Structures are given as C-alpha cells and as structure tokens.
Image: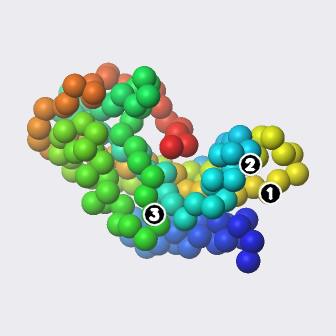
Amino acid sequence: MGAVEQSSGVVESYLSTLEESYGSFSINQRTVALSAEQYTEEDDREATVELQIQVENEDAEVLYVEEGGTLTLPSTTVSMDESLEPTVKSTVAEKAGIECRIQELDTVTILGLHNADDGESETLYRLAVIFEATHESGAVDEQAIWKEENTERNPVFV
C-alpha cells in the first residue's frame, strides 16, 4: 500500500472513531502546499492529527499563545493512537499555564498535502481537529493572552 492510500485510510478510520466518540460534526477540506522537503518529511511521518484548542474564559475571550512570533490557538501534533482529550488538556497547561474543560469537538478538517515543487506528486492526507474548551482555573503564562475574538478558524499546519 502506498503512502497516499495509507494516509487516506488512516484519515477515514480516524473519522469513524471521532464519530463514535462525539457524534456528528462538520468536516471541512483544505489543501496545503508544502515544499519538497516538508512533503518528504510528511511522507515519512507516522499517522498524526493536527490538534488545536479554542479556549474561552468567562468574558468570552479566546486564549492565544505566542509561537514563533505569531499568536495562535494552542496547538500540537499527536499520534493517532494517542487519546485526544488528555492531550488537549496537557497542551493548554503546557503552553498557557491554565487548566481547561473540554466542551465539544468544534471542527474537523481533512488536509490534502501536496508538493508545491512537483505538480505530479500525489496528495497525502492528514486530519486537523479543533476542540472548544472553557477556562477552568489558573492565570495565563507570559507567552499567552486573552483576545476578544477568535480570528483563526482554519487549522494551521504545525
């Protein structure tokens, strides 16, 4: 089985698992162009999920963390064999210093990854998941801030 078939099969299998755990949810599709180097690394990578968490506080502000000079939702990449909910909580704690409570699965996006340097390369597939959560306790670390609205509704490729 080639990388394309394998990545597609893994995404389909994981979508079924998510549906069993969370019921129905919207599924988006998005294409991401990668450099030849990123594409090769992706072809060699284990099956993973891009995971983002939208945490709101009692004032309806959304949590952002600074990563690489950019404010973004707390995010990580996880293996498909890891449980997502504990990863959500530990990612928020690690990146922002607070505890959160998961509310729901917000958005699932199938990412089609293609090699921008080779128009004939096949598309690989990956899953991106955004969870909604609420602030439960703790004050944010200095690399995190609360903003009035969430301007980032598309998953970022980590």
Amino acid found under the numbered disc labelled 1: Glu
Mark 3 element type? strand
Q: Which residue has dot 1 on it? A: 122
Q: Residue at x 27, y 27 (%)?
A: 143
Q: Which residue is drawn at 40% across and 44% down?
A: 75
Mark 2 element type? strand
Say which quarter of the image contains residue 64.
Answer: top left
Q: 130 or 36: nearer the eye?
A: 36
Q: Earlier in the sequence, mark 2 or mark 1?
A: 2
Q: Which mark is residue 114?
A: 2
Mark 1 element type? loop
Measured from the top left, where is residue 46 in percent x and y? 55, 65
| Mark 3–mark 2 distance (CA, rounded to whole Å) | 21 Å
User: Where 124 sits versus 149, above or below?
Assistant: below
Q: Earlier in the sequence, mark 3 or mark 2?
A: 3
Q: 149 or 8: nearer the eye?
A: 8
Measured from the top left, where is residue 66 in percent x and y? 36, 28
Amino acid found under the numbered disc labelled 2: His
User: Where 19 sits versus 59, above or below?
Assistant: below
Measured from the top left, where is residue 45 in percent x and y? 58, 60
Identify the coloring: rainbow
Q: 118 or 149: nearer the eye?
A: 118
Residues marked 3 and 2 touching at CB (< 8 Å): no
User: Where 41 sits versus 116, above or below?
Assistant: below
Residues marked 2 and 1 touching at CB (< 8 Å): yes
Q: In this view, does 142 lie to the left or right of 37?
A: left
Q: Residue furthest left?
A: 138
Q: Which of marks 1 and 3 is nearer the N terminus?
A: 3
Q: Which residue has dot 3 on it? A: 79
Amino acid found under the numbered disc labelled 3: Ser
| Mark 2–mark 1 distance (CA, rounded to whole Å) | 7 Å
